[in-house]
Image: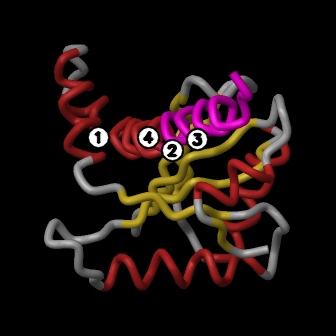
Amino acid sequence: MATLTIEELAERLQPNQAIAGLDLGTKTIGLSVSDLGRRFSTPRPVLKRVKFTQDAELLLAFAAKEKVAAFVIGLPVNMDGSSGPRVQATRAFVRTMADKTEIPFVYWDERLSTVAAERALLEMDVSRAKRSERIDSAAASFILQGALDRLSGLARVSTTSGDDT
């Protein structure tokens, strides 16, 4: 299974399944994971990128350890909504991962996630050196939190539209 929309993921998820957020960079992969209730996103240590095969193995080991049911991967769309080389690289990464796992991927517009992560780290008075270590996982956490909030909204809509009152 390769990719799903957030709405398709909402239909397929079972209760108490965690989701991982990914911020795919050229040197690192920022990671975050949801709680089982899918309310909160928590940053995890970044994966240092080496080669695709090793990156995939580390990512799948992380997914197995955290019992991840889906990946939400940031899609680095340009501010004007156009797709650049980083979007193409992200889509290629997901296509190649589809051959290695049944875990679905959901693309999530990540515009300004790194900016938001940087602001949050600054507000917490994190030093410049520590910020550079944590920024990718903080961005992954913002990406995942946006998707979790959308899933929560979809769940509310489905429960209220099912009411007969």
Label 2 crowd (10 A; few <14 / some 14-19 / many >=20):
many
Task: Indicate the secondary structure of the residue bearing disc 1.
Answer: helix
Q: How many marks?
A: 4
- How far is mark 3 from mark 1, CA to CA? 34 Å
Task: Specify the segment rendered in magenta.
Answer: 147-165
Residue 1 as seen in the image, left or right of residue 158: right
Mark 3 and 2 residues: CB-CB less than 8 Å, in contact? no
Q: Nearer the viewer, residue 85 or 78?
A: 78
Q: Residue furthest front?
A: 165
- How far is mark 2 from mark 1, CA to CA? 24 Å
Residue 147 is marked as 2
Residue 146 as seen in the image, left or right of residue 39: left
Task: Give the label, 3 or 2, closer to the camera.
Answer: 3
Q: Position of residue 101 (x, y in %)?
A: 82, 69
Three-letter amino acid code at disc 4? Gly
Q: Residue at position x 56%, y 69% from top?
A: 50
Lower sequence index among marks 3 and 2: 2
Lower sequence index among marks 4 and 1: 1
Mark 3 and 4 residues: CB-CB less than 8 Å, in contact? no
Label 3 crowd (10 A; few <14 / some 14-19 / many >=20):
some
Label 1 crowd (10 A; few <14 / some 14-19 / many >=20):
few
Q: Which residue is mark 3?
A: 154
Q: Residue at position x 76%, y 48% from top?
A: 63
Residue 146 is marked as 4
